[in-house]
């Protein structure tokens, strides 16, 4: 499988979708999700997917998706899940 060079992802720092270069290392990827309101949850999500052998690209996309879903939930634009 060919790894992407650039991705469109949800940037939790800027709270918007943007194109970015795919980081080469986990440290670089984690720096993209640091210093935001969602740092803890994004870091956990990223590391979870990497432990499942996901690529850096896939794990970063999932971390961004998690931040975006969390933002929508906090703003009340997504109904809470029922148990």
Image (tube, rainbow, N blue to C red):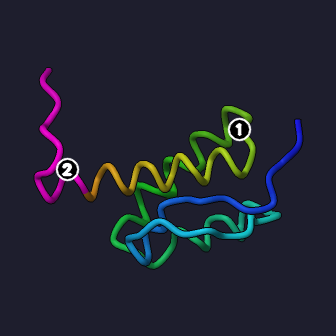
Quadrant location, the C terminus: top left
Identify the residue at image location x=62%, y=47%: 59
Total marks in image:
2
Horizontal placement of 5 versus 72: left or right?
Answer: right
- Identify residue for label 1: 54
Q: Is residue 79 above or below residue 18?
A: above
Our reading of the magenta stretch's main secondary structure is loop
Which x, y percent locates residue 33? 52, 68
Highlighted range, magenta = 72-83
Which x, y percent locates residue 13? 44, 76
Q: CA distance from mark 2 to mark 1?
A: 26 Å
Q: Which circle marks residue 73 in the picture?
A: 2
Identify the residue at image location x=59%, y=59%: 8
Identify the residue at image location x=23%, y=54%: 72
Which x, y percent locates residue 16? 41, 69
Horizontal placement of 16 versus 45: left or right?
Answer: left
Observer-nearest of 3 and 36: 3
Q: Helix, strand, or loop for circle 1? A: loop
Quadrant location, the N terminus: top right
Identify the residue at image location x=72%, y=51%: 56
Horizontal placement of 12 versus 19: left or right?
Answer: left
């Amino acid at each position: 499988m060919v790894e992407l060079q650039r991705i469109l992802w949800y940037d939790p720092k800027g709270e918007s979708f943007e194109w970015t270069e795919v980081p080469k290392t986990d440290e670089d990827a984690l720096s993209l999700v640091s210093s935001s309101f969602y740092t803890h949850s994004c870091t956990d999500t990223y590391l979870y997917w990497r432990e499942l052998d996901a690529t850096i690209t896939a794990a970063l996309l999932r971390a961004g998706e998690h931040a975006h879903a969390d933002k929508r939930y906090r703003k009340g634009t997504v109904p809470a899940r029922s148990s």
